[in-house]
Image (cartoon, helix red, strand yellow):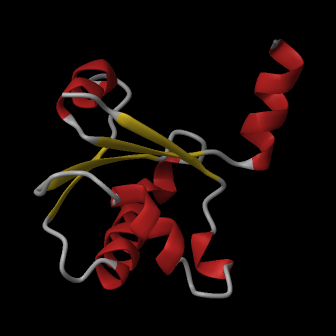
Amino acid sequence: MKTKYILVGGYPHKATDGGTAFFEEMVGGIKQPISILDCLFARPVGTWEGVYAQDKKDIAQHLKNVELNFQLADPDNFTQQVKLCIIALIIILQTLIGMWHTKF
């Protein structure tokens, strides 16, 4: 099983269609059920549960006829989680991009 990596700035809902095209493209061509690993490492740890709950709600709202299984990424188990998911949704914020850019 191959993993599809999606890097997103965290705000697909700001698109004119509310993110529908983004989410449809995200799962396009993938056999159901679809396992999505929501990686929020770029956000403060204390916000993960709330953001994760909102992400699940937003994605499910746009993909009503798609069977989805969600999992919140855990730094201690991340490697194993990625091996088991179909989509790794990785939230990247401007600060993380800036840190990565200056490091490499």
In the orientation shown, which residue stands out farthest toward the top?
104
Q: Residue at x 52, y 67 (%)?
A: 22
Q: Residue at x 30, y 77 (%)?
A: 63
**Front in this rendered view, residue 20 or 93:** 20
Q: How many marks?
A: 0
> Does 68 appear above or below 39?
below
Position in image of residue 23 (x %, y %): 44, 68
The answer to which quarter of the image holds residue 76 is top left
From the viewer's perspective, is residue 58 above or below residue 11? below
Indicate whether 71 appears above or below 27.
above
- Residue closest to the eye, 2 or 45: 2
Is residue 40 shown left or right of residue 87?
Answer: right
* Residue sitting farthest toward the right: 102
Q: Indicate the quadrant containing the N terminus: top left, top right, bottom left or bottom right.
A: top left
Left or right of 37 on screen, residue 8: right
* Residue at x 58%, y 79% (from the top left corner): 13
Nearest the viewer among 93 and 44 is: 93
Q: Position of residue 68 (x, y in %)?
A: 18, 63
Q: Quadrant of the C terminus?
A: top right
Left or right relative to 32: residue 24 = right
Q: Which is more toward the observer, 45 or 38?
A: 38
- Residue 35: image x %, image y %? 20, 49
Position of residue 39 measured from the top left corner of the image (x, y, whole percent): 43, 43
Q: Is residue 51 above or below residue 71?
A: below
Q: Quadrant of residue 98?
A: top right
Q: Residue at x 52, y 39 (%)?
A: 41
